[in-house]
Amino acid sequence: MPTFSIPSCVLATLSIGWPVVSLSQQPTYDSPETAASNEDFKVQGEYAGPQLGLQVIALGDGDFDMRLFQGGLPSAGWDRSPPQRFDGDATVVEKLVKARGLKPVQRTSPTLGAKPPNGAVVLFDGTQQSLEDHWLAGAQRTADGLLVQGATTTAKFRDYTLHLEFRTPFQPGARGQGRGNSGVYHQGRYETQVLDSFGLDGKNNETGGIYEVRDPDINMCFPPLSWQTYDVDFTAARFDEAGKKLRNASLTVRLNGVTVQRDVKVPKPTRAAPIAESAEPGPIYLQDHGNPVRYRNIWLAPRDADKDARRPHIPGFERLFANQLPATGSSQPEDSIQLRDSSQSSLRARRALLPDSLVSLDMTIAHH
């Protein structure tokens, strides 16, 4: 399958400050099965050891970029000091891994496979029926039950909590916005970016970012072809009867279980948004940017942010509920925390109370 590419003889620097896009003529892999034959895919990924974490990013043609984190991987011990940077081939990676006592790991989001609460709308569950019931004509489903990028819901929504799972392709020869690019447009207006930004700096045009508005607090992007999760609380902009905007839309975004945007005000629609800002509700739009990004397990729980704001505060509730949560450092795995209460207000309350320390992600040793 060909990559979204610029001819290798062209070197382009984008004037708007995005990374240079320089792509070689290399194939794009849209599943782990097809990528298994690529030797670089077997090397790239995450490694961990005592007080250290390593991210290895495939650059194509046997070259790799490496980032060594002190304390552990992002949200799994990293002390937030700038990571050390290395580059080299597979031999350099092997020597670094051996010298630092590291082992390959595969992390999974604690919300992977999350079940919808009562009252939620299941937008896509892998079936043809869900595709036909909830997505406009032209939406596509793969033979193995995944939703293809470039789909728009038939229904329109105001305030909601959205869960979806996505997978970016393996494109070692691609760079920047040409590497696993898609996006989740809330109401068809405000984009939370989807990109293979594994090992990058974590900018607003990378996964976890609110496009052109704010960088994520931490880059929690997993390696390409890993299933990842977005859990988003969206509150629509408010307008008066004359159509004057009274309050900006806002987003709280959790990427792979970690809060990377907390109640961020979004002053205007994303530049490429298909729908203009107004008081009208809008659809979920999964952008097609020419890369084979796949989606699954998409559900949306409608809510009323104004009603939530009027709900009386119960003294001591937060402290009482917090005492029911596993203590920091508990042996209980983070992915066992299930936010499945049938009450939508309780669901939101639980999510709001989860400390970020509880979403340090579970790591499972992976043998390549």
Image: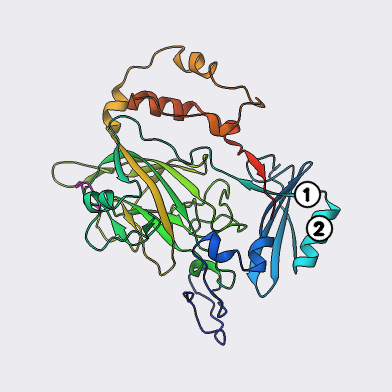
| Quadrant that contains the C terminus | bottom right
**First in sequence: mark 2 vs mark 1:** 2
Residue 67 can be seen in this image: yes
Mark 2: few/some/many CA within 10 Å (<14, 14-19, 20+): some
Q: Spot the residue most to the bottom.
A: 9
- Please name the amino acid that badge 1 sits on: Leu
- Is 343 in front, or is 112? 112
Secondary element at image label 1: loop
Report the disc number at residue 102.
Answer: 1
Secondary element at image label 2: helix
Mark 1: few/some/many CA within 10 Å (<14, 14-19, 20+): some
Segment colored magenta: 277-282
In percent of width and height, residue 51 lies at 77, 41
In percent of width and height, residue 232 lies at 40, 42
Report the disc number at residue 147.
Answer: none
Q: Is residue 194 left or right of residue 104?
A: left
Depicted 303 relative to depicted 202: above or below: above
Say whether residue 86 is magenta.
no
- Please name the amino acid that badge 2 sits on: Leu
In percent of width and height, residue 297 lies at 39, 45
Q: Is residue 97 left or right of residue 59?
A: right
In percent of width and height, residue 261 lies at 48, 43
* Whole-number angstrom distance, CA of label 2 to CA of label 1: 8 Å
Depicted 338 relative to depicted 162: above or below: above
Give yes or no for contact between labels 2 and 1 (Cβ–Cβ under 8 Å).
yes
Q: Which color scheme is applied?
A: rainbow
Could you tell me what secondary structure mostly forms the magenta stretch?
loop
Depicted 89 relative to depicted 244: above or below: below
Q: Is residue 270 left or right of residue 208?
A: left
Q: Is residue 67 left or right of residue 250?
A: right
**Residue bearing the label numbered 2:** 96
